[in-house]
Amino acid sequence: MRMYLLSKHSLKNNLIVLGLMTNLLFGCKGSGGEPAPQPDTPLPPAKAILLLPAQNEVCASGENQTSTQSTIRFDWSDAANANNYVLSLKNLLTGATSDYVSSQSELKITIARATPFSWTVTSKSSKITSTAVSDSWKFYSSGEGQISYAPFPATLTYPAMGAVINYTSNNITLTWSGSDADGDIVSYDVYFGKTASPALTGTNKPDSQSLAVEVTANTIYYWKVITKDSKGNTSDSGTYQFKIN
């Protein structure tokens, strides 16, 4: 019977080859032959859906009411992948905005009465920097004994504040959106011009929320909308400016 003895050098080479084959077969697997687990990629938070106060609602009741203040409950849907929220509340009379942080999808806030507000909710996550902002809703915090409400200030939608528009035509169309808790808007007065105090340019019926105006290149323009209701109440959108290049 013949016996073959491997030299130390040959044995070493064989072990190296065996090790390489083992790495190829199992090097990309974890214990038990399963693929090695990969770290989870955090998902961005989803947009919250606003619930209360409802769009264009009159909040006539609240907690801890005084002649000037009332505590209102804000409620919105749980947003997927979010673990905290920032509620931004804007006083539409003063333009001041306050932010409130909450880990829940509801919050009680003490606010001024006889005042229109708008609000949004930003969904956030501690695992990712991306955020999602809800739609913006408006509501009216009613005053003591108040039965008539001024229209909400019109939202100027085009051109946006500070927009720069390339000159392609000698006219553009201003657009806005208006709403009123009483539903009795009778007209929109549109002010437009080259100064920070633009002149009255046109008056629209309540179902018409756009107006074409003439423009020239290399000029800055200003515009605003005054909303009027049937009881003589008015609201001012605030003045926006934009530039035609």
Image: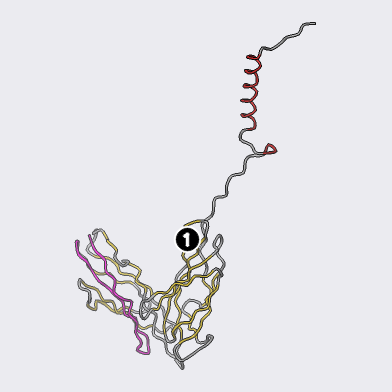
Q: Residue furthest top?
A: 1
The answer to whether 131 is drawn above or below residue 225 in the figure is above
On the rendered image, what quadrant is the C terminus found in? bottom left
Magenta-drawn stretch, dominant element (helix, strand or loop) = strand
Residue under the image location 44 percent in, 76 percent down: 138
Q: Is residue 39 left or right of residue 179?
A: right
- Read off the residue under disc 1: 131
The answer to whether 2 is drawn above or below residue 108 in the figure is above
Q: Nearer the viewer, residue 68 or 57?
A: 68
Q: Quadrant of residue 240?
A: bottom left
Q: Quadrant of residue 241?
A: bottom left
Residue under the image location 50 percent in, 64 percent down: 123
* Magenta region includes residue 226: yes
> What is the magenta range?
217-245
Residues packed near mark 1 inside 10 Å, few (<14), some (14 to 19) or many (20 plus): some
x and y, in percent, of residue 206 in the image: 37, 79
x and y, in percent, of residue 75 in the image: 54, 74
Tally of marks = 1
Q: Secondary structure at mark 1?
A: strand
Q: Residue furthest bottom?
A: 145
Question: Which color scheme does this rendered protein use?
Answer: secondary structure
Q: Is residue 79 left or right of residue 8?
A: left
x and y, in percent, of residue 45 in the image: 52, 60
Q: Tell me the amino acid under the disc marked 1.
A: Thr
x and y, in percent, of residue 143 in the image: 45, 89
The answer to whether 63 is drawn above or below residue 105 in the figure is below
Q: Nearer the viewer, residue 67 or 181?
A: 67
* Magenta region includes residue 149: no
Q: Residue furthest front?
A: 8
On the rendered image, what quadrant is the N terminus found in? top right
